[in-house]
Amino acid sequence: MQELELPDLDLDELINEPNSLVVFNDDVNSFDHVISTLIRVCKHTNEQAEQCTFLIHYKGRCSVKMGERHTLKPMAHAICEAGIDARIQ
């Protein structure tokens, strides 16, 4: 029986469903720092960033951006570099 060769596939390319960039609450970062980071990284308006920051604080987390994994990865990295816990889910 002849073996079938499959092309190298990137797992991220196989995942077509929308992903969420989730930011988690902590006791370290100020509201202003989180707001300014969301504006800079996610291109939120001031109002969007404030609403997300309040949800992060009171609910413990908030999905701040939806999209394809390859688009969210650099955003998650930049948010983490700012000292804020963010993960793609």
Image (cartoon, helix red, strand yellow):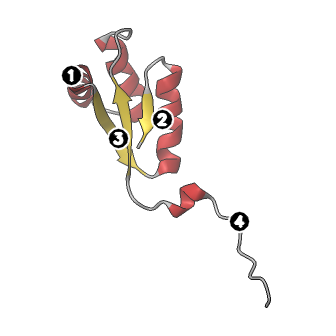
Q: Residue at x 53, y 22 (%)?
A: 81
Which amino acid lies under the numbered mark 1 shown in the image of this protein? Phe
Which amino acid lies under the numbered mark 4 shown in the image of this protein? Asp
Viewport quadrant of the C terminus: top left
Ranked by sequence position, the earlier of labels 3 and 4 is: 4
- Few, some or many residues within 10 Å of mark 2 (<14, 14–19, 20+): many
Tags 1 and 2 touching, CB below 8 Å: no
Tags 2 and 3 touching, CB below 8 Å: yes
Mark-to-mark CA distance, 1 and 4: 43 Å
Residue at image mark 3: 65
Query: In front here: 31 or 23?
Result: 23
Residue at image mark 1: 54
Which amino acid lies under the numbered mark 3 shown in the image of this protein? Lys
Residue 66 coordinates in the image, percent (x, y): 35, 46
Q: Residue at x 40, y 22 (%)?
A: 37
Query: In front here: 15 or 76?
Result: 15
- Few, some or many residues within 10 Å of mark 3 (<14, 14–19, 20+): many
Mark-to-mark CA distance, 3 and 4: 29 Å
Under circle 1, the secondary element is helix
Q: Is residue 56 left or right of residue 75?
A: left
Ranked by sequence position, the earlier of labels 1 and 3 is: 1
Ranked by sequence position, the earlier of labels 4 and 2 is: 4
Of circles 4 and 2, the one toward us is 4
Q: Residue at x 53, y 49 (%)?
A: 70
Residue at the right extreme of this rendering: 2
- Few, some or many residues within 10 Å of mark 1 (<14, 14–19, 20+): some
Mark-to-mark CA distance, 1 and 2: 20 Å
